[in-house]
Image (cartoon, helix red, strand yellow):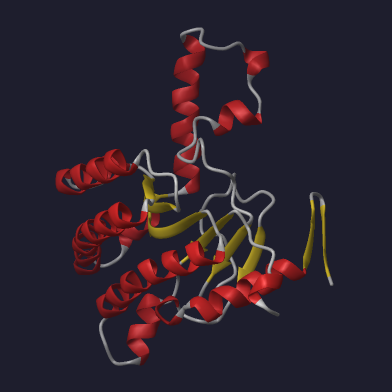
């Protein structure tokens, strides 16, 4: 299928899986895979932008990932700090808006400050939109949203009969971001892993055995080809 024939989704979300296994196959520590995976992100952002995708959301660190070995978690946090600086420079050069979704309060003060500056300085950019999920879990997000919504309800900011899907969505981390049209998960696993469960209600799912460090534009195009072949009708999805 030619690129010109592809149906381009507005928003693609990705579960970047397989970094540790990719490294293990090469006799390297898991952290080596995470470093390689981080390098792939900016390339995929550029590829997605070139293809006409407007929003890309990536799952970098889940609320459950804190249970990983402490050395691995420390390396990931250091990697996030380094990556956010690279991301800042790329965003400034490319009119890219960057937002971090998840519970930022559990992150170090240094990371929180980097996130604050990154989001503030790219807030007005209207080119490509990158969302990075750090310390994110969909159940946690919905609980945080409900707590905030209940406080507003108690303060009389809305009536019970005014609660609908749109209002609830407005309390989520992705409040003004369109729901993903396509979700991609790498490295063979076929589950959501507590990722954007509300937002993925009508998304198409694409699973590939390719590990995230090996994911590239060719693999992204394969996912878009599968998406193009599907007939998207709410409530009923068919494939040609």
Of residues 82 and 152, the one nearer the viewer is: 82
Spot the residue most to the left: 110
Q: Residue 203: x and y, percent? A: 66, 55
Report the residue at 39% width, 82% height from top.
Answer: 21
Q: Residue at x 35, y 39 (%)?
A: 123
Residue at 32% from the left image edge and 60% from the top image edge: 67
Measured from the top left, where is residue 210 in percent x and y?
51, 82
Q: Relative to 1, is 128 above or below? A: above
In the rendered picture of this protein, how many numbered marks are placed on residues? 0
Would residue 106 appear left or right of 3 to someone viewing this image?
A: left
Residue found at the far bottom of this picture: 26
Position in image of residue 112 (x %, y %): 22, 43
**In this rendering, does residue 187 appear at all?**
no
Taking depth in this image into account, of 67 and 167 the one nearest to the observer is 167
On screen, residue 211 versus residue 95, left or right, reads right
Can you see residue 101? yes
> Where, quadrant-wise, is the C terminus in this rendering?
bottom right
The part of the image, by quadrant, that contains residue 204 is bottom right
x then y, percent, for residue 109: 16, 43
**Quadrant where the N terminus is found in the figure:** bottom right
Report the residue at 59% width, 75% height from top. Answer: 221
């Amino acid at each position: 299928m030619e690129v010109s024939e592809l149906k381009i989704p507005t928003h693609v979300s990705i579960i970047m899986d397989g970094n540790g296994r990719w490294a293990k196959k090469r006799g390297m520590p898991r952290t080596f895979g995470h470093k390689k995976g981080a390098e792939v992100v900016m390339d995929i952002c550029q590829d997605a932008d070139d293809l006409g995708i407007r929003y890309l959301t990536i799952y970098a660190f889940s609320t459950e990932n804190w249970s990983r070995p402490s050395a691995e978690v420390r390396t990931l946090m250091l990697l996030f700090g380094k990556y956010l600086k690279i991301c800042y420079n790329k965003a400034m050069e490319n009119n890219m808006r960057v937002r971090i979704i998840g519970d930022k309060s559990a992150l170090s003060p240094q990371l929180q400050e980097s996130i604050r500056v990154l989001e503030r300085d790219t807030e007005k950019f209207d080119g490509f939109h990158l969302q990075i999920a750090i310390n994110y879990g969909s159940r946690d997000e919905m609980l945080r949203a409900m707590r905030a919504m209940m406080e507003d309800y108690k303060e009389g900011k809305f009536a019970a009969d005014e609660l609908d899907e749109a209002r609830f969505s407005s309390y989520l981390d992705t409040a003004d971001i369109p729901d993903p049209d396509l979700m991609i998960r790498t490295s063979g696993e076929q589950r959501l892993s507590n990722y954007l469960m509300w937002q993925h209600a009508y998304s198409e799912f694409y699973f590939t055995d390719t590990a995230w460090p090996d994911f590239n534009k060719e693999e992204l195009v394969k996912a878009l080809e599968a998406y193009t072949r599907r007939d998207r009708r709410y409530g009923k999805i068919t494939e040609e």
